[in-house]
Image (cartoon, rainbow, N blue to C red):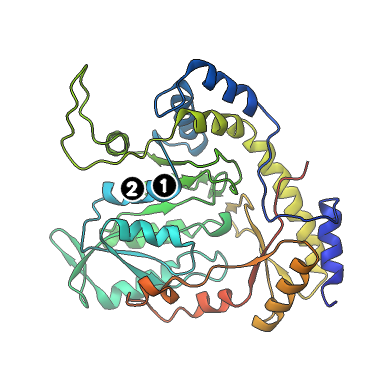
Amino acid sequence: MKFKETISFIQNQFNSKEFIPLHQPIFVGNEKKYLMETIDTNFVSSVGAFVDRFEEMMTLITKTKKSVAVVNGTSGIQVALRLVGVNKGDEVITQALTFVATVNAIAYNGASPIFLDVDMDTMGLSPKAVMEFLEVFGELREDGCYNKKTNKKISACLPMHTFGFPVHMDELKAICDVWNIPIVEDAAESLGSEYKNKPTGSIGELGVFSFNGNKIVTSGGGGAIVTNNVQLGLKGKYLTTTAKVPHANEFFHDELGYNFRMPNLNASLACAQLENLNSFLSNKRELALEYKSFFDASCIQFRTETPDTKANYWLMCVELENLKERDVFLAETNASHVMTRPIWQLMYRLPMYTHCQRDEQLNAQFLEERIVNIPSSVRR
């Protein structure tokens, strides 16, 4: 077995020769207490004290001015894109190396993705690729940036912080500012990550987080939109609560809204988890150091944070020599009950997105063939 030593090392890190999952939730705080409090109050749906507390906690954690609790990260991105002006028939610049939810959220708005390459160091949207694309295809008009090839408006840029590694946001923001393109950060995987001492999600016009069961903290299902634009945040809360106009007893909805509000039951779980975010981050960074030390002595590259950033190491990953080595690694680890998985297939390979405009994707294709996630859970 070629990767026997690696398998043994991972088993020792988690003190188990049974099945080791990729990333399991850890409940060591007030989860049961807060859940019972919620049940006892009978406020288990979208109104309740824990929803409000969750939003307050997210505002503090992300150093933003407004947070909106939603049912999941995908719905959060969908609404955030609408908030910055993405309409039916528009286009959104994003990366093909991402989870499908990023791109589906664009399609839910009736818009189309433009797939641009990622950087090798961050595995996230490349500012250089965005600049090169806009220099060829971009055209500034009175109401924004347009794609000269399609004559469609480019209404937003949607970078994703892959596995919690922050995108080069300063460079990306400088380019998007020149071309009058607002940025929505898909920060679903990066809660606790920082770029130049700024939390991810706080740098673009809006940021969106996920609290799915496999994230660094979980509410079972849930998400959050964060922003420093209070008016946009208030509009986001209004849209996600069915666009109901406040009134003591009348039900009047003056535009198309969504039933996307996070239930209080989920929020109670999220609040308990967020109380332990710092300890989870510390625990995971210790594991990352252990992995780095081990893999530095091997022919496998362990992926680490870039300068001026702090990664949450949500899903840790290694880079294999080539596709063949990747497949052997996947087969041997999983056969030994050590869960590993490849990075996502590039989005333009999926049938619903094969028609979308893209660049050469050289870095994305390189990474697609080599990156593998390894067990990354908080160790007890």
Position of residue 90 measured from the top left corner of the image (x, y, whole percent): 23, 63
Question: Which residue is farthest left?
Answer: 142
Residue denoted by label 1? 207
Q: Quadrant of the N terminus?
A: bottom right
Label whose residue precedes the other's in the sequence (1 or 2): 2
Vertical placement of 284 versus 90: above or below?
above
Q: Amino acid at mark 1?
A: Gly
Tag 1 secondary structure: strand
Density class for disc 1 (Cα within 10 Å; few <14, some 14-19, many ≥20) is many
Q: Amino acid at mark 2?
A: Ala
Q: Nearer the viewer, residue 295 or 347?
A: 347
Residue denoted by label 2? 80
Q: Quadrant of residue 317?
A: bottom right
Disc 1 and disc 2 in contact, CB within 8 angstroms: yes
Vertical placement of 251 versus 126: above or below?
above
Vertical placement of 209 versus 47: above or below?
below
